[in-house]
Amino acid sequence: MEFMVFLPGMLLAYFPVKQYLRLRPAKLAAVTAPLILLLCLAGETVRRFFHINILWLFFPAATVMGVFYVHTVKITRWKSVSVFLSICGVFSCLGNAAIGLSGETTPPFPPRTTALWFFMCCALSAAAWHSATHAARQLLEDDAFAPTWYVFWILPAVFISLNLFIMPRNPGILEQGRLRRIYIFISLVFLVLLLLSYLFFYHMASSLNRIDRLRLENQFLSMQQARYDSLLTTTRQIRQARHDLRHHFHVLQGFAAQASWDSLAAYLDEVQGSIPSGDLGLCENTAVDNVAGYFSIRCKECGIPVTFALNLPLKLPVPESDLCSVLSNLLENAIEAGIKTAPERRQIKVQAHLHSDHMVLLSVENAYDGKIREKNGVFLSSKRPGEGVGLQAVRHTAEKNGGYVRFHYGDGVFTANVILRSGD
């Protein structure tokens, strides 16, 4: 029956990720409950026939439930493992507190201790419902804090080890002097320290996420300024070309009157080269137009031909920040790939339009040379070890409101198809 604590534990683990479930909640519950019951029966069978301390059976049982949890949620492995271990850390502190309160140490989890532990875990899960469904969910949704998940699991792992270390092994040892009170105090101190560590982690993550949002806003403002400067330059060039147009007509009429066709053709080539080629507007939506205009300038500076077909209205059904973030990440990756591609093969094509008045379909296609590294459906970064942050952010932004993203590559062409849905 000790394994029954997995029931409130799994429930608490699924609270912050309910929008990332691979199975419907009813189907997930129909699978999880029998799995926990099966672990209870298997644990009791192994304990009776092989006389193994139930404490050591928790490790394989927790591994089974952890693997099950990781494969039933659509978040990164680091995040899912960290969430599962964080709950294990808290429940281990409650287990020691239950042992101290019951005073029973032989065997490690007698019936009264088991019942008290299960009740305490259920009470904590109920108390943590709001925090798990709001604060923890925000941390999982933000990608700015993603690298910290690589080391966060160490914190609950350390507390689990400490709780195992202080757990009494000899019968009646807690009844000697004040050891029982000291043991309860230490267990509760560990629990408070662990919860405070989680709180500190949350506030630190929130601060870093705010800083990252400010960075994105500054980046969009820089794009807007660059787009404005480009439009201003193009407008001045068009005004100058319009002013010089009548002079060009006088010259052309002179060449035509003299039947000097070679001179006429040469003059036309010269005039055509002086006509400004800048686009005044790539999209009706101002935010998307600023992003597209900024990367259009960058593509010209890098010698990468780019074409835009952005059929988007002034008001979008999806958050402008999401679409701009996705477009920026995809174009940033496309330019990086284009710089490494042979000049004659460089090409970027961008298309976007509305579908059903509540979805935006976006496609970015670019040429590339070399090899794309992919592992278990995750694209690896070409600049550093580990996952590529840009494409991971695109996938997260697309899927958070039920959207979709698909990356396809082959024959030197990489294509990203993204569907962004409104949050309504």
Image (cartoon, grey):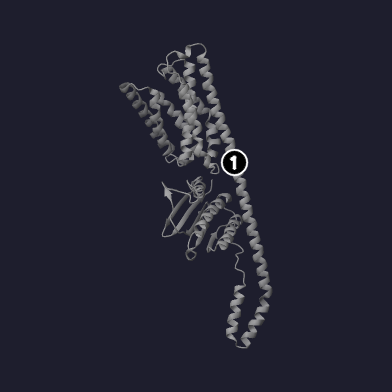
- The picture places residue 109, in percent across and down from the top left corner, at 42, 20
**In front here: 36 or 148?**
148
User: Residue at 47% of width from left, 39% of height from top?
Assistant: 78
Tell me if I can see residue 353 in this picture: no
- The picture places residue 103, in percent across and down from the top left corner, at 46, 15
Residue 164 sits in quarter? top left
The kind of secondary structure element at disc 1 is helix
* Circle count: 1
Q: Is residue 321 above or below residue 305?
A: above
Quadrant including the N terminus: top left
Q: Is residue 35 above or below residue 410?
A: above
Q: What residue is shown with label 1?
A: 208
Tell me if I can see residue 272 in this picture: yes
Horizontal side of 365 relative to 262 (left or right) equals left
Q: Is residue 84 above or below residue 141?
A: above
Most extreme residue toward the bottom, as rendered? Answer: 258
- The picture places residue 232, in percent across and down from the top left corner, at 67, 63
Q: Is residue 14 above or below residue 253?
A: above
Most extreme residue toward the left, as rendered? Answer: 49
Residue type highlighted by circle 1: Leu
Quadrant including the C terminus: top right
User: Residue at 53% of width from left, 56% of height from top?
Assistant: 331
Q: Residues within 10 Å of mark 1 (few under 14, many from 20)?
A: some
User: Residue at 34% of width from left, 27% of height from top?
Assistant: 42
Most extreme residue toward the front, as rendered? Answer: 384
